[in-house]
Image (cartoon, rainbow, N blue to C red):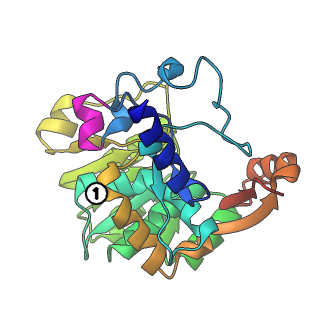
Amino acid sequence: MRRQAKSLQLLRRRVFESVVAMPLAGCGECELCRAGDYIHCAQAFARGGYAGPVAGCDTMAQFLLKPDWLLLPIPDDVPYERAALACCALGPSFGAFEAMGVVEGDTVLITGLGPVGLGAIVNARYRGARVLAVESIPWRIEKAKELEVEAVFDPKDPDALAKVREATGGRGVDFALDCSGNVHAERFCIDAVRPKGKAGFIGECNDELKIKISPDMIRKGLTLYGAWHYNLNDFPKVMDVIRNSPLAARLISHRLPMSRIQEAFEISASHQSAKIILDPQA
């Protein structure tokens, strides 16, 4: 009874607290979860322990069910809708850049400028990196320029790789990050990075990517990174990007009530949007 009363007291203190709900879930007990890398927990999809097979699974809803340790409080000085950028808009590329060690003065190539790729520009610029990109959709190209990308290359251009190398004095980029999930873009990243460079992948893809061990990994000294989310201990750093980057707010291109969710999907499918914010109470 004492344990139950203590849990209820804790619940009362958290009612109406504004939080960011982290994606998926973990067991909360394994080494990865305790270290903050819960996203890679082998039990990430075993929801039965706290939710049952389907309860609370929906995320585009007014209510959802999450373990409390995956509900991270929004700082008082961070606007509610901007805090939503801490997940898919900024989260994947933040985790990748943190792992790869992108710092001021580096040159970063980003392939695929959907909402996640545009968020990667914001993260890279916040770190003081020079940003090049690969994209063919005019709306996204213009948005990327608004977010201070230096140059955007057309993936349909047979000379695109040569132009990226020319933009780096023939050296190649220091880091490349694919946000498209397209194997041609993934291969482009591998080819565009300099010797001893690093390439990361955050675009979901189940197609086969061909890597040549000798020229890519051994002789070039390439390092590859896969990133899904960021370590929970880095949440304050993500909030710093949202709080301090003059570009972060520009990631939000549309704000719609939940009652217009079909329209939101149609806007997203048109490729004429960055981050779309849904108001669950409207």
Quadrant of residue 194 in the image?
bottom left
Q: Which residue is rendered at x = 58% and y = 68% of the image?
A: 82
The residue depicted at 20 percent of the width and 30 percent of the height is 213
Residue type beneath disc 1: Glu
Residue 8 screen position, x and y as percent: 51, 42
**Could you tell me what secondary structure mostly forms the magenta stretch?**
helix
Residue at 37 percent of width and 27 percent of height:
27
Q: Is 113 in front, or is 187? A: 113
Q: Using the image, determine if residue 169 lies above or below residue 64.
A: below
Is the residue 19 above or below the residue 64 in the image?
below
In the rendered image, the residue lying farthest to the front is 1
Q: Is residue 112 visible?
A: no
- Count of marks overlaid on the render: 1
Quick check: is 30 in the magenta stretch? yes
Q: Quadrant of the N terminus?
A: top left
Magenta-colored stretch includes residue 73: no
Residue at 60 percent across and 17 percent down: it is 53
In this view, 256 is above or below 250: above
Drawn side of residue 105 relative to residue 79, left or right: left
Instruction: Report x, y in % for residue 227.
Output: 36, 43
- Which of 64/104 is in front? 64
The stretch of residues the image draws in magenta is: 29-36
Residue 171 seen anywhere in this rendered image of the structure:
yes
Residue 146 position, x and y percent, is 59, 78
Q: Is residue 222 found left or right of 42 in the rendered image?
A: left
Left or right relative to 271: residue 243: left
Secondary structure at badge 1 equals helix
> Where's the C terminus, which quadrant?
bottom right
Q: Which residue is mark 1?
A: 98
Q: Position of residue 252 (x, y in %)?
A: 65, 68
Left/right placement of residue 108 relative to residue 146 reads left
Q: Residues within 10 Å of mark 1 (few under 14, many from 20)?
A: some
